Amino acid sequence: MIVSTKILFKHAYKRYAVGAYNINNAEQIMGLFRGNLESKAPFIIQISKGARSYTDKRLLEAMIRAADKVFPDAVYAVHLDHGDEATCMDCIESGFYSSVMIDASHEPFEKNVAITARVVAAAHAKGVVVEAELGQLGGVEEHISVSEADARLTNPDEAKEFVERTGCDSLACAIGTSHGAYKFTGSQGLHFEVIERIARLLPGFPLVMHGSSSVPAEEVARINAAGGKLKGAKGVDEAQITRAGTMGVTKVNIDTDGRLVWCRVHREHFRVNPENFDLRPPGKVFQAEYAKYIAHKNAILGSAGKLDEVRALL
């Protein structure tokens, strides 16, 4: 069942975080639904601008609708991840999306406010929820690349002004994470003082954490052992993700970890089975492994076991 993120965020606020998982194909969709149902968790399906062009937005939407019938007990929202204004407007008009993210964080503050406010006005007229972003995460996310030098944390006072002026429903904050598989060096981690101050200035307001994959060392090691070359990859400590979920971060974006599972499964399969050319055997393994990873992540987020509670609110 597709629901509004407002329902999910209200239930989760300062109790746990809802996992928001990016999908690109049928195997990811199958593993995602299975993993969330096995762990009894509500969740968010994220479709990026890149995913909409990789397959075709109509195919992705049709696969999700089909999965909704295959897995009727699932409760989830459908979200556009990192959209520009034109893509947001297209998703709003489609009538399919629960929420959209307008990412104008690379623009000056006033321009970000103006763009976000336009998207909010159009979305709210159609009953669609809007996530915005303030501050800039480092790293690479599809078409977005921000150097470490240009990355900047969200200013809590600006966050309050931004939310009040735009009317956005949730805010992605730069709190020390970064996109991609190469997030941290040394002992760098989340800036909890920034989360705490924003939550104090905006009580009850849902915050979002991007760039939140943990980049498990075991996954990286197995990929490299099977011929990969991921050197120095490092993600967010899972204990920090759990803590953030009790401080007002109600949505945690996870994309890179799913790609690592895909990469590991396929590299190991074809290393052991070099004669195979059938995509289905590794695809089946990936679905099971991805479901297992999703269930694990939901336990870290605290969303595991919350499905029945959320369903009772509907």
Image (cartoon, rainbow, N blue to C red):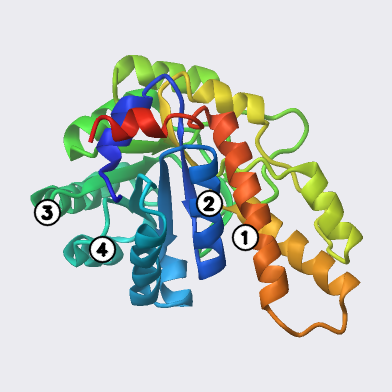
Which numbered tag is attached to residue 125? none
Say what amino acid the circle numbered 1 marks.
Answer: Gln
Whether residue 197 is visible: yes
The image shows residue 304, relative to residue 267, as above or below, that is above
Residue sitting at x 48%, y 25%: 245
Q: CA distance from mark 2 to mark 3?
A: 30 Å
- Left or right, residue 179 beside residue 17: right
* Residues tagged 1 and 4 counted as in contact (Cβ below 8 A): no
Q: Secondary structure at mark 3?
A: loop
* Residues tagged 2 and 1 counted as in contact (Cβ below 8 A): yes
* Residues tagged 3 and 1 counted as in contact (Cβ below 8 A): no
For the residue pair 285 and 117, the one nearer the viewer reads as: 285
Q: CA distance from mark 1 to mark 4?
A: 27 Å
How many numbered marks does the figure carry? 4
Classify residue 214 by image quadrant.
top right
Residue sitting at x 61%, y 25%: 240
Which numbered tag is attached to residue 126? 3
Which numbered tag is attached to residue 287? 1
| Residue 294 locus on image (x, y percent) | 58, 45
Mark 2 or mark 4, earlier in chain: 2
The residue at which mark 4 appears reads as: 91
